[in-house]
Amino acid sequence: MATLAFNLHPAQREIHEHLARFKVIFAGRRFGKTVYSVIRCYEEALSSENSRGVVLDDTSEVIYIGIDREQAKRNAWGYFKKFAFEIESATGLKCRILEKTVAVTLPPELGGCTIRLLGMDDPDAARGMKLRFAVLDEYADMPPRVWPEIIRPALADCRGGGMFIGTPKGRNHFYQLVEEHIDDEDWGIFNYSMDDNPLIQEDERKALAQEYARGSSDLYEQEIKGKFIASSGQLFTDKQFKIVPELPKLRYDSFLAVDLAGFVSDPDRKNEKRRLDDTAIAVVHAPTDSTRWYVGTIAHGKWGVRETAYRICEAAHKNKISIIGIEKGALLNAVEPYLKEYMARYNRWFEIKPLTHGNQRKYDRVQWALQGRAEKGDIYLVKEGEDTEPWIDKFIDQAVSFPSKYVHDDLIDALAYIDQLIPEKIGNFDLEAWEESTQFVPLDAVAGY
């Protein structure tokens, strides 16, 4: 392998030293993603053996993939040619630079590997290639099938590596990729801001911050800080949910609803936990003289069936709840024996009310139960202590993203089930009590009038 010295700033060096086979870099503009990815392409192209012990020859290639070939050429081709010229200057050997096909082939003495620029406007162009390394630039703008169907199989012969780079664009398949592999040993996940690039002058940073301050703070967080920002959802905005430090001193009825999402059989099996949604346990305190909901907590996690039952019982006991609601079905059937076991063990009894979705789509059910209350400002989130409770941040994140196939909705779903437990009120008027009081009662049971 020929050795070349590349200058990396500290954040790039941190990525470079990580040993993961696949790396995902979601970062703000001008962090240095493109330059670093070009360097990695050359490092892999110059290698005679990769980090997984596979011997490499000129039958395998390195590819740099853009949204389309024109974008890839515009963003990276200049850097590829620049480093090719530096290799020629350092070694005295000639690289083959092909402008028309946008490719660089290293001299045979340096392994003869070809680095090729492709565009995903024609994803199938990469089919059949034998790859040792691939960079996917602006992955958020590529078709989701590009990686699993085309690029990943092409890396199998060489056990090659890959790198995903880009600035987030809402919660899409790029976000899903991060979420799926956050705990995977073969994957390195990196998030950096433009501020992590020391080559950007301080006065320019301040000028950009001031410019964005006059517009959208979300845009600044996304474009400069490199954060996955949820766009405003179809039903909710973050301003609709009020956070209060404690429950006001009023008379309440308390309710608990559970959205079961399957049970973890082995806590150490990360893949199993990653596939499951969270089970969510929502506790709501409803003042008897208003339509407000004070959400005390929404506990959530991936638990085994016994631990799930224990957490439900614990929440019911702590909040003095006599009726809990759980959607009827196989999961309720699985957890119910353990609920009864804990009730008997601790002599704490409560009724288990099976809930139904009434053949409604989740969107319709959530809309019916929560949207009107949220718009009226009737949903309050109760935090404890100085900092915002983690469940509150997660709940608001799910609410403003709903509905999204890339963001879970477990906490939203659990809260929506509360609607089936609380008697419906109109202002201070208890509709359920009125309906009971106006039931037809015949004066004469025989005559029926």
Image (spheres, rainbow, N blue to C red):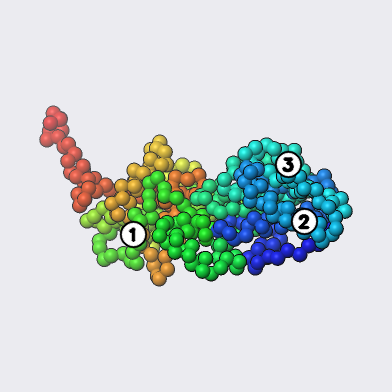
Classed neighbour count for the residue bearing mark 1: other residues with Cα under 10 Å, few (<14), some (14–19), many (≥20)? some
Q: Amino acid at mark 1?
A: Lys
Q: Mark 3 or 2 closer to N-term? A: 2
Which residue is labeled 1 in the image? 242
What separation in Å lies between label 3 and label 2 (alpha carbons)? 18 Å
What separation in Å lies between label 1 and label 2 (alpha carbons)? 59 Å
Q: x%, y% of residue 323? A: 35, 52
Q: How many marks?
A: 3
Q: x%, y% of residue 196? A: 58, 66
The mark closer to the camera, 3 or 2, is 2
Q: Nearer the viewer, residue 424 or 18?
A: 18
Q: Nearer the viewer, residue 264 or 333?
A: 264
Q: Amino acid at mark 3?
A: Thr
Q: Quadrant of residue 156?
A: top right
Which residue is labeled 3 in the image? 101
Q: Mark 1 or 2 closer to N-term? A: 2
Q: Nearer the viewer, residue 321 or 73?
A: 73
Any part of residue 308 in sight: no
Q: Which mark is residue 85?
A: 2
Left or right side of 169 for 435 = left
Q: Amino acid at mark 2?
A: Phe
Left or right side of 432 for 414 = right
Q: x%, y% of residue 87? A: 79, 58
Left or right side of 247 for 167 = right
Secondary structure under the numbered disc 2 in the rendered image: helix
What separation in Å lies between label 1 and label 3 (alpha carbons)? 57 Å
Residue displayed at 83% across by 52% down: 94
Q: Quadrant of the N terminus?
A: bottom right
Disc 1 to disc 2: CB gap under 8 Å: no
